[in-house]
Amino acid sequence: MKILVTGAAGFIGFHLSRRLLDEGHEVVGLDCFSDYYSVQLKRDRIKRIDGREGFSLVEEDMNDQAAMERLFSDHSFDAVVNLAAQAGVRYSLENPKSYVNSNISGFLHILEGCRHSGVGHLVFASSSSVYGLNTTMPFSVHDNVDHPISLYAASKKANELMAHSYAYLYGIPCTGLRFFTVYGPWSRPDMALFLFTKGILEGTPINVFNHGKMKRDFTFIDDIVEGVVRVVMNKAAPNPEWDGADPDPSTSPAPYRIYNIGNNNVVELERYIGALEQELGKKAIRNYMDMQPGDVPATFANVDDLVQDVGFKPDTPIEDGIKKFVEWYRWYFSE
């Protein structure tokens, strides 16, 4: 297959592109190398796949309509995986406009490209943050998610709605993936595990929100990639039993699906930090803080639909995932 991966220099995009290349697919990687975090880290990721047979890099911003029109006219994609986005819940409180540009306008250009070029399957990243004020655990794709508490979450919910409208109007198979707290080697420097590791090794305090009572469904990057690859190969199809009188948010009479990809295992933040301390052989200096605006106290993924439809359930224990991250961190910063 020929697959477009947007955000190919990003954390998930890099790992996915490498996996697809390993399987013999042709990958066109799109990235604008924004400076939201270290551009050097993004370049270092891309260096590990650029030049490989079957990979080509396109340096453009998906918010550039003309550039996206050229991209889709120059290539015929069997599938598109949209991972490019302005990430981060907390940053959305500081710079909301960037979320509209990347996550709304940019996504529209991807949808239009798929529409006009006959793409066979659009798979796009959503987020566990769309569950917002929901409290029923584990979070289910069959539950209503109309109460996001950050603009980032709202932009991801908007992506789901936009994709559904295109699936319905134009018959484009669209699948949205709600990722749950992804971690692992090559992750973003603004993510908790990266910040904690840096702080512990430097002997500086780490900020522990909600006084360590945060609970997260931490999902290792290899599990995320496995789930994405399986979903790409499992084209979204209409649900013939969908009922408008009792609408299921995760399916549709259009070729549209939503899945959670999470470890299906809630871990308290203190255990997460403890596993990291064990791996680093050094104690953290904790700076306990209140919850931040836009954050939620807990996430927990119901992955029954993912298991049923693609036969995969993420299961990497946090101790194993953290060990692999620390090995990468020590290697990367010792080069």
Image: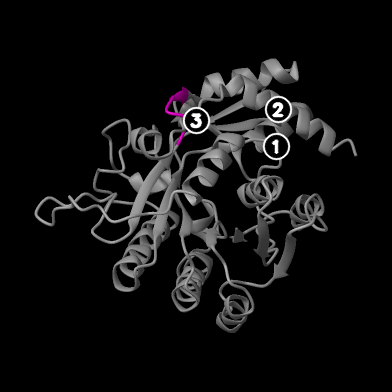
- Check residue 324 in the rendering and tell me which mark sits there, or answer none: 2
Q: Is residue 280 above or below residue 130?
A: above
Q: Position of residue 152 (x, y in %)?
A: 45, 56
Amino acid at circle 3: Pro
Circle nearer the viewer, 2 or 3:
3
Looking at the image, tell me whether mark 1 or mark 3 is earlier in sequence order: 1
Amino acid at circle 1: Pro
Q: Is residue 155 above or below residue 73?
A: above
Q: Position of residue 218 (x, y in %)?
A: 51, 31
Discs 1, 2 touching: Cβ within 8 Å: yes
- Check residue 314 in the rendering and tell me which mark sits there, or answer none: 3
Question: What's the CA distance linking mark 1 and mark 2?
Answer: 7 Å
Dividing the picture into quadrants, the one containing residue 299 is top left
Dividing the picture into quadrants, the one containing residue 320 is top right
Q: Is residue 140 above or below residue 122?
A: above
User: Could you tell me which secondary element the residue under label 3 belongs to?
Assistant: loop
